Image: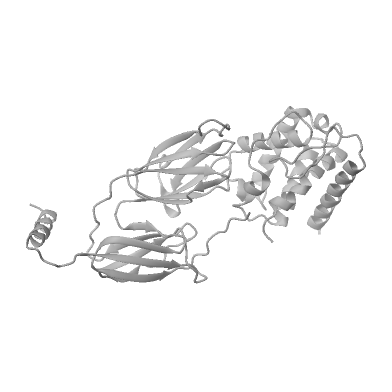
Amino acid sequence: MNRHHLRGLAAALLVALGTTWATAGTLQITVTGKDGLPLPDAVVQVEPASGARGKAPPPVQTHIAQHKMQFVPAVSVVPVGSRVRFTNQDGWDHHVRGVPAGMAGLTASTGAGFELRLSGQVSGQPAASTEVVMGQPGPLQLGCHLHGSMRGFVYVADTPWVVKTDAQGMATLGDVPEGAARVRVWHADQLVEGAPVPVQVQAVSTATVPTQVVPRRRRL
Amino acid sequence: MKHLITATTLTLLAMASGHAIAQGMAQPMAPQPSPASAYPVAPAPGLFDALGQKAGIRSLMDDFTQRLRADARIGEQFKDTKLDALASQLTDQVCQLAGGPCVYKGPDMKEAHANMDVTRAHFNALVEVLQVSMDARGVPFARQNQLLALLAPMHRDVVNTR
């Protein structure tokens, strides 16, 4: 019998005894950029100091559109093994590629990532689409071979405690083990990841994580 | 200084071509704004043929896109771009603008450049590369200017960063 089994057994016993020992809390994190304003589309990952990884959440099916020269949504967070359907809603072709983002892209083996060609949508007909399974954890950068300026990201997570910030720069994570933890923030426009921020997870806790990120603006 | 001259020349050319429409000179027909250009620009008579029709425009664009990637000022923007596809899109666009029987189906110029920070200097650099390409292909100077006049109004949509 290994340690995991023992821990599971202990937890089961505690539950069985009807103890009120709370084991998990909710953590609400606000991420700010270099200008101090809330930073949307930042990926927040919480790592309990105990080293607990948590059970990888079940894969999901989700969707990323190519619409008016953008990936929509621009940043997706999905559990490892998830199926992502790419759909080209523009009237012209896109040649989508996904490669490990940032430093990982420099060392990734050839063949890591994917690429797919989607023909332009003819009005009145369904848009071309293809499904890709996200098999490797980590951030993937999306681009288009035909339109070099298109950029998007898929953050493939292998723990349950990963979520992206909303338009208000807020990320809420539930079921995080109480106690000491570290918060890591990933953002597309962050060149070097900042030092993890220590937090104390309680039943309900909040934290603000400042970063040096200057988000790139779309100029229209 | 050279950039300034190029930009001024383009503006003048754009104005000149607008003037031509106003005077009702022999024009094939009043073009409508399209993704190829949001401005109703009319091609000089015979421009499409002078550029060697679609095949001539395509070989000009093949040359142009390779020079773009090699350019020290703006080449970085094209390092991950499939030049073949870019040349094909540009061919459709230029062919249509020059009065040829093509339809450009790509993004409009605002959308196409929204994710890039394009300055006036970038725009002028691209114009200069195109001029070098046209020189290399033996396009007569007057015809070069007629093509540039069709492209010049785009700076309002393409240049999005001071």
In the rendered image, residue A84, in percent from the top left (x then y), is placed at 40, 41
Foreground: B83 or A55? A55
The residue positioned 49% from the left and 71% from the top of the image is: A36
Residue A148: percent from left, percent from top: 58, 45
Q: Which of A71 and A109 is in front in this view?
A: A71
B137 and A52: which is toward the camera: A52
Quadrant hosting residue A171: bottom left
State the image coordinates of residue A168 (x, y, percent, origin top left). 46, 64
| Vertical position of residue A95 compared to residue A176: above or below | above
Specify whether A220 is left or right of B40: left
Residue A139 visible? The answer is no
Q: Estimate the x, y position of residue A105 in percent, counting from the top left.
A: 44, 49
Q: Give the side of residue B137 with respect to residue A68, left or right.
A: right
User: Residue drawn 62% across and 51% down?
Assistant: B114
Figure quadrant of the C terminus of chain A: bottom right
Residue appearing at x 19%, y 65% in the figure? A23
Image position of A195 (left or right of A125):
left
Q: Which residue is drawn at 57% across and 35% down?
A: A93
Q: Which residue lies furthest to the front in this view?
A: A124
